[in-house]
Image: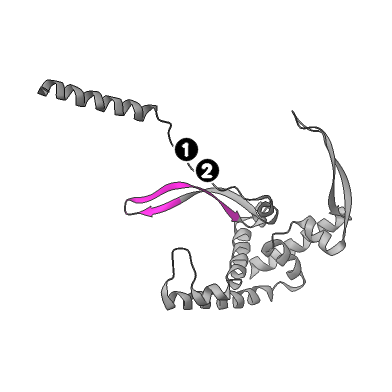
Amino acid sequence: MSNRKSLEAVAAMTKARRGAAQGAPKPEKPKPHIPTPEQLRKGFFVQQDVVDATPRGAITIGKAHRRHAKFELIKGLGTEQIKALRAYRAAFDESERSEVRCALDIRPGGGGGSDAALTAIEARAFGKEALRTIESRLGGTVHTMRDVVLHDLSFSEVAMKRFGSREVDYIDVGKGKRKPRSYVKLAPRSGRHREVIREEFFQGLQLLVER
């Protein structure tokens, strides 16, 4: 085979490969994990960028749903109030660290040695002490603050927990192909009960900010 024919053959093969590559379907980007209905009932999730630090700077490598405290949804909260609530929640989260995980230093990607395990145990102890200090200033509002800030209950859910609930019939008129349906939902016995909890929450929040 002459050099000319050899070059033509190589060019044809290269063109064919490029055509096949261009015609091939592009791989789909991985979709972020969607929280389960059970997770959504127990927490508030926000889809955020996943950022990786590199020598050239931070780069976005995908998206993920991250859990946020439900109190973030309460309307009318100021910057200082949000900071105080986050500090309270952070102390609680530290105090709830698993003793087994702290002792064994079980973390994603492997362990970090005895120093890291000791740091985790100290952080848990510090969280417990910080939590006790914070709650000692909350007085009679402490139970409401725990339910709302630490356990992600709404004002209505706390009201039902304390004062009882009643069944309310609702009608979903439907939309498009969705047919109308009726369903029963639990609600506080009185709308005033929810307001009682809301007032207690903001009283406790004032004490938290003053601290």
Q: Which residue is mark 2?
A: 31
Depth check: 207 or 133 in front?
A: 133
Give the image quarter of residue 9: top left
Depth check: 104 or 140 in front?
A: 104
Identify which amino acid the numbered label 2 is placed on. Answer: Lys
For the residues bearing labels 2 and 1, Cβ distance under 8 angstroms: yes
At 75% from the left edge and 29% from the top edge, which residue is drawn?
177
Q: Which residue is mark 1?
A: 28
At 10% from the left edge and 22% from the top edge, which residue is drawn?
2
At 42% from the left edge and 34% from the top edge, which residue is drawn?
26
- Give above or below for 30 relative to 152: above
| Residue 48 falls left or right of residue 146 | left
- Give above or below for 15 relative to 80: above
Magenta stretch mostly in which secondary structure? strand
Instruction: Point out the stretch of residues depicted in magenta.
Output: 51-67
Secondary structure found at label 1: loop
Judge the density around disc 2: few (<14), some (14-19), many (≥20) Cα neighbours within 10 Å: few
At 78% from the left edge and 61% from the top edge, which residue is drawn?
158
| Residue 171 falls left or right of residue 15 | right
Judge the density around disc 1: few (<14), some (14-19), many (≥20) Cα neighbours within 10 Å: few
- Give above or below for 77 relative to 120: above
**Residue 160, horizontal then vertical, whole percent:** 83, 59
Give the image quarter of residue 189: bottom right
| Residue 54 falls left or right of residue 63 | left
Mark 2 and mark 1: Cα distance apart in space: 8 Å
Identify which amino acid the numbered label 1 is placed on. Answer: Glu
**Residue 90, horizontal then vertical, whole percent:** 58, 66
- Furthest toward the front, the residue is 1
**Residue 115, horizontal then vertical, whole percent:** 43, 77
Secondary structure found at label 2: loop
